Image (cartoon, rainbow, N blue to C red):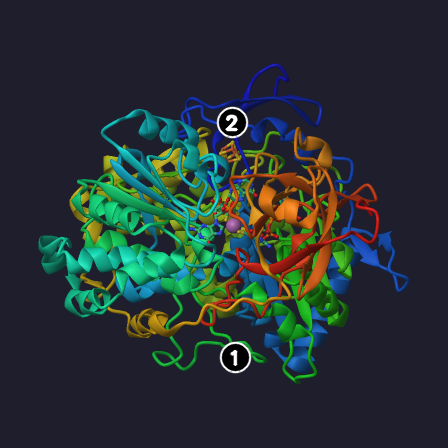
Amino acid sequence: MSETTWKATACILCSENCGLEVRTEGRRITAVRGDDAHHSEGYLCQKAARLDHYQSHAERLDTPLRRRPDGGFERIGWDQALREIAARLRAIRAEHGGHAIAYYGGGGQGNHLGGVYGSALRAHLGTPYVYSALAQEKTGDFWVNGELFGKQTCHVTPDVEHADFVIFLGTNPWQSHGFPRARKVLKAIAADPARTMVVIDPRVTETAKLADVHLRPRPGTDAFLLAAMLGVIAREGAEDRAFLDAHTTGAAEVLAVLADVDVAAYAARAGVPLADVERVARGLAAAERAVVRADLGIQQSYHSTLNSYLEKLAFLLTGHFGRRGTHNLHTFLLPLIGHSPSPEEDPTVPLTRVTGMRPIAKLYPPNVAPLEIDTDHPERVRAMIVDSANPLVSGADTRAYERAFARLELAVTIDVAPSETAARSHYVLPASSQFEKGEATFFNLGFPENRFHFRRPIFAPLPGTLPEPEIYRRLLVALGALPERFPLLEAAARAHRKAPRARLFPLALAAALKARPSWAPLAPVVLYATLGRALPPGTASAAVLWGAAQAYAQRHADAVRRAGVADTGAGLGEALFEAILEGEHGIALSEHEERDAFSLVRTPDRRVRLAIPSLLDELRALAHEPDVRDPAYPLSLMAGERRTYNANTIYRDPAWRRSDPHGAARVHPADAARLGLAEGDRVAVESPGGAVEAVVTLDDGILEGVVSLPHGYGMDHAGARTGPRINELTQSAHCDPLTKTPYHKTVPIRLGPTRSPLER
Ligand SMILES: Nc1nc2c(c(=O)[nH]1)N[C@H]1C(S)=C(S)[C@@H](COP(=O)(O)OP(=O)(O)OC[C@H]3O[C@@H](n4cnc5c(=O)[nH]c(N)nc54)[C@H](O)[C@@H]3O)O[C@H]1N2
Ligand SMILES: Nc1nc2c(c(=O)[nH]1)N[C@H]1C(S)=C(S)[C@@H](COP(=O)(O)OP(=O)(O)OC[C@H]3O[C@@H](n4cnc5c(=O)[nH]c(N)nc54)[C@H](O)[C@@H]3O)O[C@H]1N2
Ligand code: SF4
Ligand SMILES: [Mo]
């Protein structure tokens, strides 16, 4: 690879995964630009320019580490590390069963292939317990989708780009993105007098400044606000009758509950003028093409699951579903999530042993993980494998996580950097970076067109590191679950690459899995160890996509052909796989037709089931909900704002930031005046769960009584910590009862004088 040429890759910092072209020197990324040939159309934001701070930062791990009894770490070899980990996993499983072992993560914003290979390890160990960041934000949304559309995998994508009436609900896409080319699309909507942008956010965000209408509810009152909006629609008969009759059941029951809402009282409870509520409700109902795009502002807030339901009722009752510029379901090449039936539907659904938590979308909530570990319950979790996540910073209640990790008999962290979670693990396994291995994400969420980008490595692995698929393969070999080599399958795979039509490899694979049934659940790693070896250098991790491409092509043959992949029968899957491997700028997987939209609904009659009894009960109960505040903690903290210079915990070296070095606390000038605080002052932020220190910045765009701190600060780098570690303030019990999603946007706090110097 010539160093002066541009190489295609993708940004790994948010779920957009914009296509990039980069220049490199040695192991460094020296220039970054948007990739015009990628479906992101050359778009990028300011965060991507700094990617070398991820790739080449001073603390990259380059050898497996083992914790010594004194808490320090020693460097050990891969073989020894994997042998020892395998021995401890085997012993824990033998004594306590597979449920004593849990898995956390399996993918971040830019890497999801590792998680698929990790599923083979979980299958061998016999653990269903996957704890994931998604299960501290999106499981309420997934659960509601399951009730409405039949399966929790029926994920809804709003087509913001083509809508003429857009509601941003608890999201600030100018900073967080969440849909393609967000800033361009926002500017286009703002500039077009025929289109309307509504922002529902207590804060005057960058997005709100572009809006035609900005509703500012008091934090945590969205359920009241949304109920009031829907109440207006129900009372005025503004629902889309034709759509409801053709595509839904249960509308009458839902509308009856909504018609009972005391609209004026609920608007007042949310602190929003009644006229604004009516204007937005009527605008939504009258619009030809409208979307509601929601995110953490309603999901990590009071009535999280109910909020997701009301948000979806808003676009369903008004018929904004199944068309361009509205909402659609989409296909998945590989599932990011699964479907978990309720324990009543399927009594074999594995609940957690200590708290009895059920999975949603096959995921378990990080909020209960410490409770499953830090207990004397005989069936507690004793071992945890963490991959691509840093729960010791990102999980609610850092102290609870610290105590829990101290109780683990085995903690293994797979990471590129010495994260706070790695620091509390017994073994740390160094992964190759996301630019040093073939990777992809499963955030491909488009309809009618769905795209996928498998990216090849732009560097060789940093010496001493391994890509996750290889780590899982070696671990399964060390566990005695798989042989080191598969001579027959490997030969069949080589032959298959030359003559796929002979179907030699699929036949050999089927025969091998039949002869060795214990390999079947390990199929991803078997594919990696066989077909992967026959793939072009650096692309072995794509092996699992071969199986996925076959299944996808079979299921969506017409749509795949419409996307330009040509072949027949089994050849279509092969051609799709080849296109994925070759498509360095990403490819179109499928092109559906608008009329296919309802074919993706998974209820038996393909109708959307609008009435969800438990949530209608919660909706009715709003009428009697007291408005309680704790006088000891009179302020409300939004614990986790997305800003110009934060990106989850991916960038660890604070040198990447060009502004906001401290992750300042936004405080309203009136609150500051009352507390005697000025710009730049240090302040202690105290919650019932803990305290952190922060620097004050005055902001009249925040409501009085509200404070906002950013997510993605508080990591340790080169012996120093920058910015607040906000989960030292949060408590896991402060959460949605159904999903356990933390109420991070409404943490009760007070501000007081600091006791110690800011930087530790
Ligand atoms: N720059 C940057 N971008 C990111 C990330 C990052 O770390 N940095 N992380 C990515 C990830 S993992 C995610 S999940 C997304 C999240 O993306 P967003 O959800 O858009 O981001 P947040 O800033 O957490 O919250 C959005 C808004 O919710 C508002 N809000 C707070 N409380 C309430 C409330 O009670 N009601 C309403 N209606 N609004 C409220 C806040 O003022 C804020 O503007 O961002 C992604 N993009
Ligand atoms: N209070 C509060 N807490 C929050 C939030 C909030 O708003 N407020 N936001 C929440 C949200 S929405 C999310 S999504 C989570 C995100 O938090 P996490 O789920 O912890 O995910 P990341 O911050 O992306 O952590 C990624 C880890 O993966 C490592 N990594 C990077 N590349 C690779 C790789 O190729 N392989 C491996 N094995 N590791 C790699 C990084 O070094 C880092 O340690 O945080 C949540 N926590
Ligand atoms: S929007 Fe920004 S952070 Fe997100 S993928 Fe694109 S360049 Fe990266
Ligand atoms: Mo997230």
Which sits in the foreground, 159 or 256?
A: 256
Above-or-below relation of 51 to 487: above
Tag 2 residue: 20
Residue visible at 41% across and 31% down? 181
Dot in front, 1 or 2: 1
Q: Is residue 686 left or right of residue 47?
A: right
Residue 395 appears in which quarter of the rendering?
A: bottom right
Alpha-carbon span between mark 1 and mark 2: 44 Å
Q: Indicate which disc, 1 or 2, sits on the residue closer to the N terminus.
A: 2
Tag 1 residue: 356
Q: Is residue 94 visible?
A: yes
Above-or-below relation of 77 to 520: above
Q: Residues within 10 Å of mark 1 (few under 14, many from 20)?
A: few
Q: Is residue 233 left or right of residue 136?
A: left
- State the image coordinates of residue 481 (x, y, percent, origin top left): 61, 65
Residue 142 appears in which quarter of the rendering?
A: bottom left
Q: What type is the residue that disc 1 sits on?
A: Gly
Q: Is residue 503 visible?
A: no
Above-or-below relation of 498 to 640: above
Which sits in the foreground, 93 or 196?
A: 196
Does the numbered disc 2 mark a residue whose Cβ is under 8 Å from ligand 3?
Answer: yes
- State the image coordinates of residue 571 (x, y, percent, origin top left): 30, 42
Which sits in the foreground, 586 or 626?
A: 626
- State the image coordinates of residue 196 (x, y, percent, origin top left): 28, 35
Q: Secondary structure at mark 1?
A: loop
Q: What type is the residue that disc 2 sits on?
A: Leu
Residue visible at 26% across and 32% down? 195
Residue farthest along the right direction in this orientation:
70
- State the image coordinates of residue 1 (x, y, percent, origin top left): 61, 21
Q: Residues within 10 Å of mark 2 (few under 14, many from 20)?
A: many
